[in-house]
Image: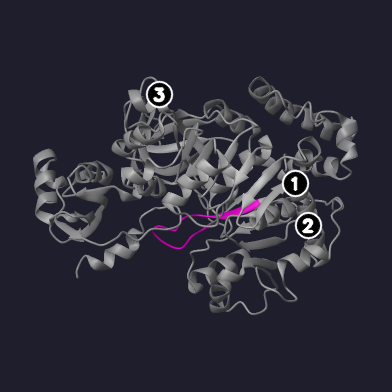
Amino acid sequence: MSRAGRGIDRVRSDLGQLAQLLSPRTGLTFLRAGVLDAREVAALGVALPWYVGRGPSLGLVSAVNAMAVGGKTAIHDRSGALTWRELDARANRLANALAARGLRGGDRLALLLRNGREFAESILAAQKIGVVACPLNTWAKPKELRHTLESVEPKLLVHDAAHAEQVRGAGIDDLPVVVVGEDGAASYEDVLAEAPDTPPPPFTPRRGSSGVVIHTSGTTGRPKGAARDASRTGVRELIGLLRVVPFHRDDVILCPAPMFHSFGLLTFTVGCLLGATLVLPSRFDPEDTLDAIEEHRATAVSLVPVMIHRIASLPEEVTSRHDTSSLRILLASGSAIPPDLRRGVADLFGPVLYDLYGSTEAGWVAIATPQDMRERPETAGRPVPGVEVAVFSPQGIRLVAGQTGELYVKSRALFEGYTSGEEKERLGEFMSIGDLGHLDREGFLYVQGRADDMVVVGGENVYPREVEEVVAAVPGVREVAVFGAPDREYGEVLVAFVVGDVDAEEVVAACRSQLASFKVPRKVEIVDELPRNATGKVLKRELLPRIGA
């Protein structure tokens, strides 16, 4: 069989599976769009070369959506609305402009962009010409930005004008830039205007190149660049996710979660694959989110837990003013959601919460459905179909149901490795996710916290999450972070940082009444807020220096 013939077979195999999944729910599938017809694929001009020797590409999906549902709204953002046809044409223009500036397959394109069309177009354009997109944290300080840019080594940076000061402070003077929202020679819109909207020419992928580099949260140190090859992202695992979370092609998906992290990017990927409509606010505000659900009749929303907490904390007179009855799915990820907040979501929106457990390195691992959370309030759900989770002891022995150990994952959605050359620990085909937990006899996963967060107090193992749940239940406590601090006598002791209208003595008393003595925090600090990153994870490294204050 010719190479082109093998490419067509791969299209049939991969997208055929997706079409079979979607057709019962939507009636409009990739099959009806012509994706599985070799003549239709050839009519896209450049589509088939993208597939030969590669896997699925969002660049191809964008072209397919332009043909299949071209007049449908693809994106609502701060600049208005774009149809799928308009979005694909703008992505083609950017791809051609990048190629004219010398970017080739395997080169890296850095993105310092808020959610919106420019982020979407940059991702699509990069995949159309085989360039590796590298989204960067828009919250990064200049020193952090410099470090990530140096590790990525991009050939060009696209950034919002709002982040110009960060870029100047990073001091990467020889890096070419394109600026969104600013007039001039490097204006994003001018760059698009100078290029044709025809599909870019075919490219030959470089050996070892990757589709995207996503940076980790950096909660305990510097963020690491995690490389993902689009050709190895498992369609089977993606289909498994869609079998659990009931997305369909007619969805309007609101995504305030930052798309420069893996969760927001996953939401964008799902929206593209379905040809759904995406609502992309450039910033998060709790009441604005409720406004957007009502205005756009959003059927799905992606939020990190701190966003959910802030919405659930709004006064009832505010939440009751908004009609959110259109919402079927609230997809959450980024950090653990305590049982009381899960119940609060059900009270506010109904049984719509799907709690996704995963990581930048491991992709999507498990999902707790509304029914799972009703029956097992603390579970992370069952592993996504196509993903296998195993629990290992420190000696590398695979543990049985009910035994706690380090969690390992086997999946085609695993990352390729860090750009620094570092690797995650592996045992055969399984990769460590860095968390401790166990599986029960029915296959439900329970996560007890980061393996490196476990605190050994006088020889006793303590999981901070257990203590955090007790403290969170104290009246007046809004937020809490518990972790270990060095101690001469015990090796380590627990410290707690609490936000809320509460006394430290009340927190200690609650812990003494419910926990063993070695689990009671030795120090409780009442603070105005907890430092967090863009996905809402607490930056414990910023709290450690306060312990001795």
Residue to which mark 3 is pinned: 371
Label 3 or label 1, whichever lies nearer to me, is 3
Which mark sits nearer the N-terminus, 3 or 2? 2
Amino acid at circle 3: Gln
Residue 64: image x %, image y %?
Answer: 78, 38
Amino acid at circle 2: Ala
Q: Quadrant of residue 20?
A: top right
Which mark sits nearer the N-terminus, 1 or 2? 1
Badge number at residue 59 = 1
Q: Secondary structure at mark 1?
A: helix
Residue 433 in the image: above or below residue 35: below
Inspect the magenta stretch and tell me whether residue 368 lies in it: no
State whether residue 461 appears in this view: yes
Report, in whole angstroms, how far the alpha carbon at label 3 lies from the one at label 1: 36 Å
Residue to which mark 2 is pinned: 95
Determine whether, in the image, residue 186 is placed left or right of residue 134. Answer: right
Residue 424: image x %, image y %?
Answer: 49, 48
Inspect the magenta stretch and tell me whether residue 219 lies in it: yes
What's the magenta region?
212-224
